[in-house]
Image (cartoon, grey):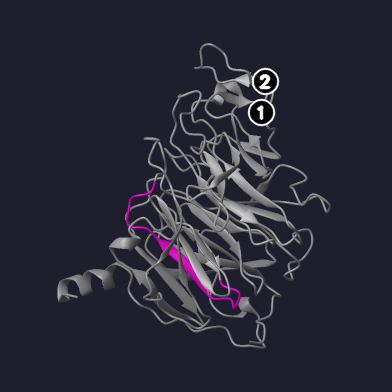
Amino acid sequence: MSVLLLLATLLADPPRKRVAPTYGTRFCDSGADVAGITLPPEFCIRKFADVSTPRVLAFAPNGDLFVSSPKRITPGGAGPGAGAIFLFRDGQRFTFAQGQAFQTVHGLLVTSNAIYYTVDESVLRVPYAAGGTSIDPSTPEIIAQFRATNPSARWTHSLAMATDGSMYVTRGQFDNTTCPQPDDRSGSVLRIGAGHAIEGDIVAAGFRNPLTIRCMPWGNCYSTELSGDSWDSAGGSEKLVELHDADNYGYPCCVARDVPAPEQSPKPDCSRITRADHTFPLHNTPFGFDWERSFGWPEPYRNAFFVGLHGDYANWDHAGLQWAPTDPVTHLPSRATTDFLTGVGKGKTIQRIADVRFAPDGRLFFSDDHGGAIYWIAPRTLPVPRH
């Protein structure tokens, strides 16, 4: 690596050693809350690390945090990152992978023996052993290869693995009016891996942008869905859905069940479109989401649902972090989500919340892809666990 290239890399993402909290203390005992941010008084918020364009967060079983930093400008307008996957362990950061092959890295999934990641048109796998700090030099194995048949296809995929070992990937698309779609896999959630077609088998379709997918310990998998940007007057909404085989959410033909898209002529049949399990106002842009799972959070936040809002594309309005209590049987939000963290937006310290993940130690992490940083939130009583 040339001296100039090395200097540019260091300036983009300077290495920094962070001091890990000490066992026997509480996470909130050190540091100071982020200025300008409001959240319930029984919680603290701390900046975890500076990372250029942090998009997706993934925790390994041992608690290591992996972060994707794509170099391509994101559909939401976040600037070019490092083209890398970063690893955080015990207060230290490592460049786990970086280079031309990671320019569009986005989705991440970490298991006990492998790391899966997405690039523009593929899902790849590399071996991984706990404690490793760089990518295995073995040639990555292609798990899925997407057909480039849709000029509106997005490169920002998400990955998840269900409790039965099934693996899922999302394929989003930009706004378009092509009804019906020429490729059923455009705007879909696909099941991939051994026993499935290399381009994936469709689980659910009719999405514009299933931005984030999560599979939870109780066996269900969920996805957010960003609806048609021009559907304000037609009752359009963003969605949270529980995934089931053969579900179809109608995009771009239908706004919702029995509601044809206003720009379609002749009007399509929307009588069999799958209903959303939960909705958000259009343009709030729900990004990452997760559930508290008895990590030590106080009531009423125990077992609650949390979602990061990227906000309106044009002005970042409504960007922030929201929450809702959940139904103990379905785990779905039992009411509309409301603000948990505010003070986010243009010109603020925290600008747009992207991914949201609970760490095994009980802290709630989130990425700010426009502000270039990762933060965590914890109850002020949450203790640092013994390693």
- The magenta stretch is 60-74
Q: Which residue is mark 1?
A: 273
Q: Nearer the viewer, residue 10 or 224?
A: 224
Residue lying farthest to the top in this orientation: 266
Sequence-wise first label, 1 or 2: 2
Number of marks in picture: 2
Residue 137 picture quarter? bottom left
Secondary-structure class at tag 2: loop
Please say if 115 is above or below 19.
above
* Amino acid type of the residue that numbered disc 1 sits on in the rendered structure: Ile
Q: Is residue 266 left or right of residue 78?
A: right
> Does the segment drawn in magenta span residue 68?
yes
Q: Is residue 277 left or right of residue 376?
A: right
Give the quarter of the figure containing the C terminus: bottom right
Q: Is residue 88 left or right of residue 325?
A: left
Give the quarter of the figure containing the N terminus: bottom left
Residue lying farthest to the right in this orientation: 329
Please report contact status of discs 1 and 2: CB closer than 8 Å, yes or no.
yes
> Does the segment drawn in magenta span residue 328?
no
Q: Residue at x 61, y 80 (%)?
A: 29
Q: Nearer the viewer, residue 299 or 15?
A: 15
Please say if 328 is above or below 286.
below
For marks 1 and 2, give the CA distance: 8 Å
Q: Tell which tag, 1 or 2, sits nearer the viewer.
A: 1
Q: Which residue is mark 2?
A: 258
